[in-house]
Image (tube, grey):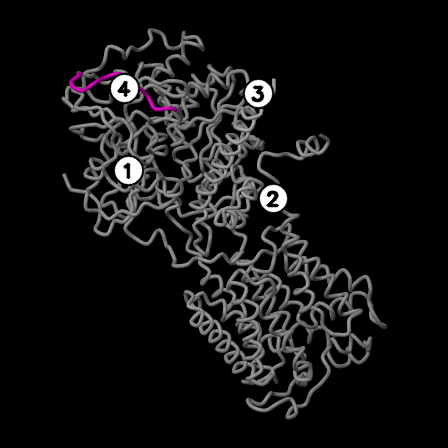
């Protein structure tokens, strides 16, 4: 009889098998989903779009590595979440943003918002959006100058060296539908032949990336669909200026960072509800705040702040969207309430 | 029509290694170790002592309260009665029998003259004396389930889901012994007084479904085979009830609360053998599989066979085997030694030598919510983990941690590889300790007040 006494056996709790999906594979999927939009940006804005993204990623990874190193915590760079944050941060900045600025933004995103609160999964607002908000507050001029469509950004140099132009959202803020329509067609907006932040211009390619994430089951459809649908319904009902409801709605959902925000920002695990019902409510809230800020706020764009505001509601949403206990049917609940 | 329940996961079923291999009879082991606790309930009292001669089917352990008797699985001499390691962890009083290889059948094993003429009470008594328990692993005494369910149960369900990966014992039983299954169903229908028994089978066992349907058609038996979606934990008792009837078992309740009774495929076969042949539970079909097994097999062996004999029969284990599991990979117990016997609830022995565990250093929850979507009993594992790791007992209770059945679906699906199920076992113990402490404190307070009153008088 073979001796099985020498087997070195590990006795751990069930389950003894695990799915192949890991934090790293999820983050890799998100990175893959952002590539089409990045390629389009390089095509539109020039090589600066790529170099700025790379610098932003390197900055975020460096800050994460440095913080974990200095604090003597286990290294977490390998989970690729800092890469995702770096890409997203670059995506929400104008292509003309200086390199040093995204590195500062990366510090705020990674160190202040993410690591100081405990690292991955513990941050209470989206790190990339918080980084953008920080930069917008600190360098408003740079962060609101948009390169004119068709112009290429120089690899080095500031906004002073390029031709800037109004984005569709500025026309819309001013209610100048004639100006908007003569500059950008709805199709331009959908495909991405327009001005705006580095990664937000092509609704089509962001939609492709988002569909990939839903297909890979990385994100649920609830958040992005609820978000975009809410903006669509509200803008259809309340058009501004001389636009028809439909026209205004299309410009509204394809303009600005709505698709980027809906598919890549609002779906951030750490800062969105855990149940599908909660995600639906979260998406509706994001849509509502986006429209309110665009209509009544002093900013042209409301996506960034709307998501950050809704991030703060997440614990509350989680509390009130708990799954119904197994085995408790509605009539039981009513009886319990009656007692 | 394939049915569904809420949540669940879809692991690779890994059944191809053994699902085409016929059940083999193990060469009789030289010695069997029969633990006195192979059921849900208090351990049995041994009826034999060292030196006694026993025969196959002879009762050697008597139960008290909730339980089922235990029988000798080979004939021979009792070597010793002492605590031995067993698959549920720790040591338990066991009867060690040295096999004389005579296979003498005990006089206690008597086939009823006319099985079909038995009354319900007689059949329940036979099931009780045969030591039948839930063979799927839960090991709840079957006679208790039957006598407790008569009158309340309108749906009798046979659990052929076999949703745990690797395990193929029930599948092979469907293919090789469909008459026993259908025969057992007929007796169950009679006991419960129902006109139909439903067999739930995951649709990855189509040939098993066909084999049973053939027998049903031949015998015109009151049995229906219901194909189910392939999803873990489809074979969980409550999930199976939900899939078949659409009803949910209330929290802390039993399937009988919604008029259901669930029996495993091999439990049904055991009922058939007990009623037609008078044979108690002395043998068990075990799937021996996993990356660490050289030649995976389905083996039928006497209860009490040392696991090492099964491993030997499968060519031994590969170098680097780091895990030995009694049961399936999702709910089975990891063993620290191969020196354990096969018990009534041991459906599989798995050995792993590859990276099935995929553990990571320093796992961090990313709040993806996949555990919430996977939980078949609608819990929120990620929050329960936080509460348990911080010892927040009241919050754990409010999060319904006691509803957790430790199926492992959340931990399986967790991309961050959090040790969720492990933490919930710990958390449930915290809640139980707190309840016990609260109860003791309340009683102490009451006693103190009574004393005070007595003094005052």
The spot of residue B98 in percent (x, y) is 16, 24
Q: Residue at x 21, y 16 (%)?
A: B55
Mark 1 residue crowding within 10 angstroms, few (<14) / some (14–19) / many (20+): some
Q: CA distance from mark 2 to mark 3?
A: 52 Å
**Could you tell me what secondary structure mostly forms the magenta stretch?**
loop
Q: CA distance from mark 4 to mark 2?
A: 47 Å
Residue at the bottom extreme of this rendering: A161
Name the front one of labels 4 and 1: 4
Residue that numbered label 2 is attached to: A323
Where residue B455 is drawn, which disc sits there? 3
Dots 3 and 4 on the same chain: yes
- Which portion, as a residue range, is magenta? B42-52
Name the front one of labels 3 and 4: 3
The earlier-in-sequence mark between 3 and 4 is 4
Q: CA distance from mark 4 to mark 1?
A: 37 Å
The spot of residue B171 in percent (x, y) is 36, 34
């Amino acid at each position: 009889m073979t001796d099985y006494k020498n087997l070195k056996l590990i006795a751990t709790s069930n389950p003894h098998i695990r799915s192949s999906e890991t934090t790293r594979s999820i983050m890799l999927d998100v990175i893959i989903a952002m590539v089409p939009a990045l390629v389009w940006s390089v095509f539109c804005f020039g090589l600066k779009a790529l170099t700025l993204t790379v610098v932003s990623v390197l900055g975020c990874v460096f800050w994460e590595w440095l913080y974990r190193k200095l604090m003597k915590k286990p290294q977490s760079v390998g989970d690729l979440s800092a890469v995702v944050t770096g890409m997203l941060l670059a995506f929400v900045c104008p292509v003309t943003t200086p390199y040093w600025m995204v590195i500062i933004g990366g510090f705020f995103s990674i160190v202040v918002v993410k690591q100081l609160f405990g690292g991955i999964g513990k941050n209470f607002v989206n790190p990339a959006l918080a980084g953008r908000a920080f930069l917008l507050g600190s360098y408003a001029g740079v962060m609101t100058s948009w390169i004119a469509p068709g112009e290429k950004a120089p690899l080095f140099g500031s906004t002073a060296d390029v031709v800037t132009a109004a984005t569709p959202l500025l026309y819309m803020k001013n209610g100048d539908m004639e100006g908007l329509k003569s500059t950008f067609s709805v199709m331009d907006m959908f495909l991405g032949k327009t001005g705006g932040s580095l990664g937000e211009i092509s609704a089509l390619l962001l939609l492709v990336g988002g569909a990939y994430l839903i297909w890979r089951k990385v994100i649920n459809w609830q958040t992005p669909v609820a978000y975009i649908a809410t903006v669509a319904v509200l803008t259809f009902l309340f058009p501004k200026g001389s636009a028809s409801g439909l026209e205004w709605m299309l410009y509204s959902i394809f303009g600005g960072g709505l698709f980027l925000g809906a598919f890549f920002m609002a779906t951030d695990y750490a800062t969105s509800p855990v149940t599908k019902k909660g995600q639906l409510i979260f998406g509706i809230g994001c849509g509502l705040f986006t429209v309110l800020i665009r209509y009544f706020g002093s900013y042209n764009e409301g996506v960034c702040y709307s998501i950050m505001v809704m991030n703060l509601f997440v614990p509350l949403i989680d509390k009130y969207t708990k799954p119904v206990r197994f085995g408790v049917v509605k009539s039981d609940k009513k009886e319990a309430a009656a007692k | 029509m394939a049915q569904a329940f809420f949540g669940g996961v879809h692991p690779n079923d890994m059944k191809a290694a053994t699902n085409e291999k016929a059940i083999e009879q193990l060469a009789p082991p030289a010695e069997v170790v029969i633990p006195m606790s192979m059921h849900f309930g208090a351990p049995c009292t041994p009826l034999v002592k060292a030196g006694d001669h026993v025969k196959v089917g002879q009762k050697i352990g008597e139960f008290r309260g909730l339980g089922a008797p235990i029988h000798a699985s080979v004939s021979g001499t009792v070597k010793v009665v002492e605590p031995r390691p067993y698959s549920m962890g720790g040591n338990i009083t066991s009867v060690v029998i040295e096999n004389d290889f005579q296979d003498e059948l005990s006089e206690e094993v008597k086939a009823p003259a006319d099985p079909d003429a038995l009354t319900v009470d007689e059949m329940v008594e036979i099931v009780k004396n045969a030591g039948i328990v839930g063979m799927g692993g839960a090991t709840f005494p079957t006679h208790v389930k039957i006598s407790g369910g008569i009158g309340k149960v309108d749906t009798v369900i046979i659990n052929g889901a076999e949703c745990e990966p690797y395990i193929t014992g029930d599948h092979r039983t469907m293919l090789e012994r469909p008459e026993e299954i259908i025969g057992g169903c007929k007796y169950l229908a009679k006991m419960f007084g129902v006109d139909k028994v439903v067999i739930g089978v995951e649709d990855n066992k189509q040939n098993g479904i066909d084999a049973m349907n053939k027998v049903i058609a031949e015998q015109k038996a009151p049995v229906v085979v219901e194909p189910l979606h392939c999803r873990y934990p489809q074979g969980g008792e409550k999930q199976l009830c939900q899939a078949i009837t659409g009803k949910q078992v209330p929290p802390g309740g039993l399937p009988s609360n919604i008029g259901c009774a669930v029996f495993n495929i091999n439990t049904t076969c055991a009922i058939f053998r007990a009623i037609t042949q008078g044979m108690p539970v002395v043998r068990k079909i075990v799937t021996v599989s996993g990356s660490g097994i050289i030649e995976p097999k389905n083996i039928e062996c006497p209860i009490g066979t040392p696991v090492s004999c099964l491993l030997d029969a499968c060519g031994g284990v590969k170098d680097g085997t780091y895990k030995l599991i009694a049961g399936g990979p999702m709910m089975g117990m990891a063993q620290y030694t191969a020196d354990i016997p096969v018990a009534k609830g041991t459906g599989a022995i798995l050995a792993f030598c590859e990276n099935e565990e995929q553990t990571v250093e320093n796992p961090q929850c990313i709040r993806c919510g996949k555990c919430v979507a996977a939980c078949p009993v609608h819990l929120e594992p990620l929050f329960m983990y936080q509460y348990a790791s911080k010892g927040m007992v009241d919050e754990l209770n409010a999060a319904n941690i006691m509803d957790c059945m430790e199926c492992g679906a959340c931990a399986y699906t967790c991309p961050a590889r959090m040790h969720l199920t492990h933490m919930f076992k710990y958390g449930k113990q915290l809640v139980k300790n707190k309840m016990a402490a609260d109860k003791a404190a309340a009683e102490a307070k009451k006693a103190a007040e009574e004393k005070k009153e007595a003094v005052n008088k």
